[in-house]
Image (spheres, rainbow, N blue to C red):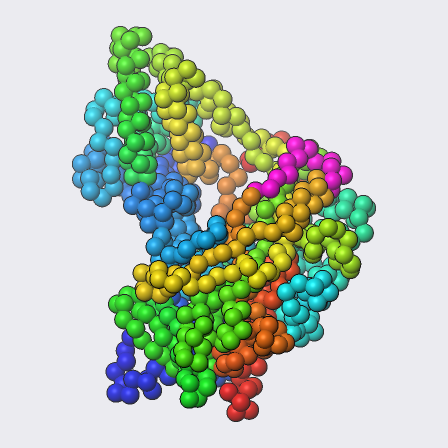
Amino acid sequence: MPHFNIDAEKANTYDAIVIGSGISGGWAAKELCEKGLKTLVLERGRDVKHIVDYPTANKHPWEFEFGGRLPLEKQAEFGRRGARIHESTAHFWMKEGEQETVQEKPFQWTRGYQVGGKSLLWARQTQRWSDLDFEGPARDGYAIDWPIRYKDLAPWYSHVEKFSGIAGNYDGLPQLPDGEFLKPFDLSCVERHFQKIIQQNYRDRHLIHGRCAHVTEPQEIHLQQGRAKCQHRNLCNRGCPFGGYFSANASTLPWAERTGNMTLRPHSVVHSIIFDEEKGKATGVRIIDATDGNTYEYFARIIFVNASALNSNLILLNSTSSRFPNGLGNDNGLLGKFISWHNYRGQISGRSEDFPDKMSTGKNPSHSYIPRFRNLYKQETDFLRGYAVGFGSSSRAVQFSRVGIGEELKKNLFDRSLGPWWVSGWMQGEVIPIESNHVRLHESLKDKYGIPQLVLSCDWTENDDKMVKDYMEQMTEMFEKAGFTAINARDSGSPPGSDIHEMGGVRMGHDPKTSLLNKWNQLHLCKNVFVTDGACMTSTATQNPSLTYMAITARAANYAVEEINKGNL
Amino acid sequence: MDRRTMMKSLAITVWGMMAFPGCGPENQTELKGLVKNLNLNQDQLANLEKLVDTFLPKTDTYGGVDLNIHHFLDKLIANCYPEDQQIEFIGGLNKLEQHAQESFGQRFSALAPQDREMNLLLMNDESKPEEKSFFEFAKEQIILAYTSSEYFLTNFTNYDMIPGGYDGCVDVPQGTYKI
C-alpha cells in the first residue's frame, strides 16, 4: 500500500469504511460511493475481479486435468473436505487454518473470504419478507419486536431488486410480497402438476416460481453494469462471465469503483474498530495485513460492518476499550447472543412416473418454491412459526446401465434413455432465536493473526425437532396426493449452520436495553457504526436472507449519508 | 459420424492432451516432477492399458485406450489418491497378472480379448474384497473418464455448455434424439 504521505493518518482517512465486500458490503460500497463518499472497502481475502478471476468459468468437463478431482497437495489445503471439493470451485473455498474456531457445539460455518464473499457461491434465491414475518416476534412472543415493518423496507427492496435483477412471477401472496420482477424461469411439467394438486387440496399453500437473482431480461441498468442475460449454463458457482446472476463482483463493486470514490483493500483482516473515548464515537478500523502481518489503522466518519454475520459479531466483541470492555456497544451484554439460522434438516425425495412423453430442454438455474403456510395468521401447531419449501424437478434423469464389461458395457454406455422425473424438496425453517445460542471470544486461544478465536455455541431446540417432523408429514402427504412414488422423507440431522444462513448476535430493536442496533442499523451506543449484514437480524423468518440484507444495507447507507449532510454524524 | 469428423475430434480431445501434453508414453520421463505418475514398470503399464481396453474396447466407436484413459488413470491415481489407495491399485494390476499366469499360463497383456475378459471377471468376486474393490474402482473411474470425454459428450450426447434457455415441458421428439 502506498502510504508515502508524511501525515499517515490523513492519508489513511476516508469518509466511510466498509468492512467486507460480499452481498451486503458491496451494497454499502455502491450506495456510499454513489453519494460521493470516499469509501474504503476492507476485504480479508484476496481480490477476485469479475471475469478475469474466474479461471474455470469456461472449462468443459474434459478440460480438468484430473477430471475435476484435486491433487493431494491441494486437497490437504482444505482439510478433511478436500477430497470432495471440485476443481471448478476450489479457488472460492476457505483454506483450513485461515480462521480457527472453537466449536463448543457442532456448527458448520461456511465462509467466503475473498472479494465478493459468498455472493459468488450463493444459491441466488431472493424473496421479500412480509409483515407476517416482521410482526412474528411480537405476535408469538419470542426474541424482541422488530423496529421496522414491511413499509419501511418495501422501497428499498424495489431499489435493490431493480439493480440486481430478480426473476420471478407476480403471485399476489400476502405472505410473500411481489417485487420488481423480470420474467421467471419456466416450471417443468411435474412442477406445474404439483402446483395444481396443491392448489386443489390446500387453502394457504402455493407452489410458485422460485424468485432468484438472475437477469432473464436485461434492462438498461443491467447493460450499464456490463451484465448480460443468464445463459442457463448452471455453472454459477465458478463465477459467471456473463454476469447472468447477481454477485458483488459483477454488479455493486464495479459500479462503486466507477464513481472513483472506492478504494478496495484486499488481504485486510479486521482486528477491531477503534473507539475514541473523548469524541464518544468510533474513529476507524484496525487491520492486520494478511500478506505482511503488520497492523494498519484507517479512519473514517462512519463505519459499515458487513463482515458476514458471525465475523461481524467477532469484530465487535474484539473492539474493546475502557468505555466498552465487553465489546463495542455492548453495555447490555447481549452482543453475540440470540444467534439463529435456518433449519434445513427436513428433506424429501421421490419420483414421478407421469409425463413419460414429456421432457425438458436446456437447463434451469432455479427451482420452485412453496412459501410458509404453517401458523401464518394464527398459532395452529405445537411449534412456533413454520417453514418454506424449496422444490425441484427440472428435468428427467438420464439413465444408462453400468452392467457388464467389454462390448456389453460399451453398448450400455451409449444406450442412454430418459428415466423418471426425480422430485425433491428441502425445508427452510425459521429457527427461534434464544439467548443460549451464542458466540463469544475464547479467553486465550487466538487464530493465526492473533485475533481471539470465536467460540460457537448453538444448538437445535425442541421447536426445531417438532418442525422437522411436521415438514416430513406434510410433505409426504402432499407428495402422495401428487402421485409421486418412492417417497423418502428424512431428517438429515445436519448441524446448525449447514444452511449458510446464520444470523443475529447484533440484533435490531427499539430499546438499547434489549438490542444492539436501532431501526437504522446504528449501534445504539456508537451511532457512527452501522451493522447491516446477517448479524443485525432480530429474527430469521423463512425467506432466503440475502435480499433483505441488501435492502437493509441500502436503506441504512442512504440514511447515513443524510445524517452526515445534516451534520449529525 | 464420418471419419474426417472423427479424426478432427480425436485431435482436440483425449483428456486435455493439448493443454497438457503429457499423455503419450514418450513424454513420461520429462514429465516427472511436474505431474506425478504411478511409476509403473513396463508390465504394469501394459496391464493398465489392457485393463482399460478390456473394460471398454474399440468397436465401431473409440475404445478407452483411444481416449488415453490408461494414461489418465495413471496420472489421476498418482496425484489425487492417497498412497494406500495407490498401492492397492498397483496391487490390483499385479493380481491381474497373477491370475493370467495361473489360469492361462500367459501374461495378461498377451491374452486374447475373450480370455482377458474372463481373467478380469475373476477379480469381480465378492469373496475377495480387495479384488472386488479394485474391479469396482477401476470400472467406475473408466466409465467416468469415458463418459466425460469430449469425444463422448460432443458426439453422442446433447452436451451444451451454453443452452441459453430452459423449457420445462416439451414433447419427447419422435425418432432418434440425443440426450
Q: Residue at x 49, y 22 (%)?
A: A403
Q: Residue at x 70, y 45 (%)?
A: A470
Q: Nearer the viewer, residue A491 or A445?
A: A445
Residue A258 percent across, percent down from the top left: 44, 76
Q: Residue at x 38, y 82 (%)?
A: A299
Q: Is residue A566 visible?
A: yes
Q: Which stretch did the figure color magenta? A: A477-492
Residue B6 percent across, percent down from the top left: 40, 34
Residue B125: image quadrant is top left
Which image quarter is the N terminus of chain A in? bottom left
Q: Is residue A471 above or below residue A411?
A: below
Q: Is residue B35 left or right of residue A483?
A: left
Is A337 magenta? The answer is no
Residue A135: image quadrant is bottom right
Q: Is residue A103 left or right of residue A142?
A: left
Total numbered circles: 0
Q: Is residue A355 left or right of residue B49?
A: right
Q: Residue at x 47, y 81 (%)?
A: A302
Q: Nearer the viewer, residue A260 or A509?
A: A509
Q: Is residue A38 above or below residue A413?
A: below
Q: Nearer the viewer, residue A102 or A220?
A: A102
Residue A447 percent across, percent down from the top left: 34, 60
Residue B62: image quadrant is top left
Q: Specify the farthest residue to the left.
A: B29
Q: Is residue A542 above or below residue A536?
A: above
